[in-house]
Image (cartoon, rainbow, N blue to C red):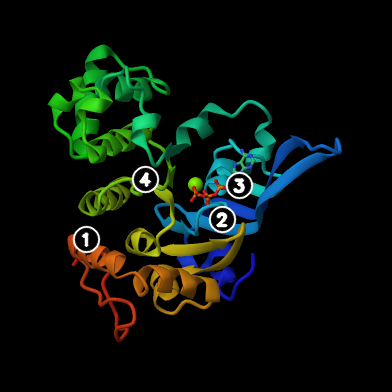
Amino acid sequence: MTGTRAGAVADGTGSGERAPLLSVENLTVRYRLGRGLTGRARTRTAVRDVSFTIPGGRTLGLVGESGSGKSSIGRAILRLAPVSEGRVLFDGADTAGFGRRTPLSFNRDVQVVFQDPMSSLNPRQTVETTIGQALTRHRALSARDRDREVTHALDRVGLASYHADRYPHELSGGQRQRVAIARALAPRPRLIVCDEPVSALDVSTQSQVINLLMELQRELGVSYLFIAHDLEVVRHMSDEIGVLHLGRLVESGPAEQVYRTPAHAYTRTLLAATLVADPVRQAVRTAHRRALGATTPAPGATPGTSPRIGDPA
Ligand SMILES: Nc1ncnc2c1ncn2[C@@H]1O[C@H](COP(=O)(O)OP(=O)(O)OP(=O)(O)O)[C@@H](O)[C@H]1O
Ligand SMILES: [Mg+2]
């Protein structure tokens, strides 16, 4: 990993004393593109030499512009994209050692929430079926226990029991994403890869879903890899932030530090592009901060100590 604060995430010392749940070591993701006109096999390197760790119960926010390799990293962790070089260790075990058959325990422990629940949820299944299936995939449950747990899962993500009978198209975007979160939580995972889970939602719904994810983390101790193209979104929920540029991690460190005193020129560009140059986005962001109940001043204002959103008073 490159960047001035790389060591803080790479060796886990920036996250306190907790042992890493996930370690990504010098990860390179290279896609095969098939043969070109010359007949030579072509490849595209989407991620180069990226390293970070996520301790249990913590969040790493991964930001970068479109095409920077964020989803490729998430997919490599989920074993959906090739780990061409380097290693992905989950709970100390090298996932390359799993071979073709991913162990059931890994399939249970590592879940995913995607950006668009309309395409990730089955349109022909009710909420009850979707969550019920996720509950019983890894555990034997009686029909009665299953119903009870579906109701509990809905309650936990802020939905009512009557939502159980609804189909995805009968729900709002935020409600659909809550169902996707309930489905991801059903197997009681230890890590959830959240790939732009709020990018398609309006600002106030984004804040609600982020607050929900943070509450669930406090309650359940689950870790998140939270992918976004927006530093403001990850700032509030991340312990650490990594900034990706053209497949490389150019900066990483504690969230507030990266946000307030970005060391890398690209991070400053990301911040400047979204916070200063665009007055419309700036207004949206101010509303966002308010909706999240943030008490911190806007970037550029005098830095001071600020409570993390959602921390107990
Ligand atoms: N299956 C694939 N085969 C070939 N190239 C791919 C594949 N998936 C992604 N890429 C390429 O890898 C690079 C990184 O893509 P990736 O989807 O990881 O970026 P991203 O940061 O998630 O972007 P976005 O913000 O648009 O979702 C891009 O150049 C993309 O075109
Ligand atoms: Mg992506």
Camera-near label (3 vs 4) is 4
Q: Amino acid at mark 2?
A: Ser
Say whether disc 3 or disc 2 marks the residue closer to the N-terminus: 2
> Which of the two discs, 2 and 1, labels the residue nearer the N terminus?
2
Does residue 170 sit above or below 201 in this rendering? above
Which residue, given by chain and number where applicable, does mark 2 sit on? 68
Could you tell me if the residues under marks 3 and 2 are in contact, i.e. CB atoms within 8 Å?
no
Label 2 to label 1, Cα distance in Å? 27 Å
Mark nearer the N terminus (3 vs 4)? 3
Instruction: Determine whether the beta carbon of the residue marked 2 sits less than 8 angstroms from the nearest atom of ligand 1.
Output: yes
Tell which tag, 2 or 4, sits nearer the viewer: 2
Closer to us: 255 or 228: 228
**In front of the other: 272 or 211:** 272
What amino acid is found at the position of numbered circle 3 in the picture? Leu
Residue 222 vertical placement versus 141 (above, below):
below
Q: Tags 1 and 4 in contact by the CB under 8 Å rule?
A: no
- Measured in 3D between alpha carbons, the distance from the residue under mark 3 to the one under mark 1, in whole angstroms, is 33 Å
Judged from this view, the residue extending furthest toward the top is 143
- Kindly identify the residue that appears in the image at 54 percent across and 76 percent down: 265
Q: CA distance from mark 3 to mark 4?
A: 24 Å
Mark 4 — residue? 197
Q: How many marks?
A: 4
Among the 4 quarters of the image, the one containing residue 163: top left
Q: Position of residue 130 (x, y in %)?
A: 32, 23
- Residue sitting at 26 percent across and 38 percent down? 173
Q: Which residue is found at the position 41% from the left and 74% from the top?
A: 272
Q: Quadrant of the N terminus?
A: bottom right
Q: Secondary structure at mark 1?
A: loop
Q: Secondary structure at mark 4?
A: loop
**Residue 89's mark?**
3
Q: Nearer the viewer, residue 231 or 77?
A: 231
> Label 2 vs label 4: CA separation?
17 Å
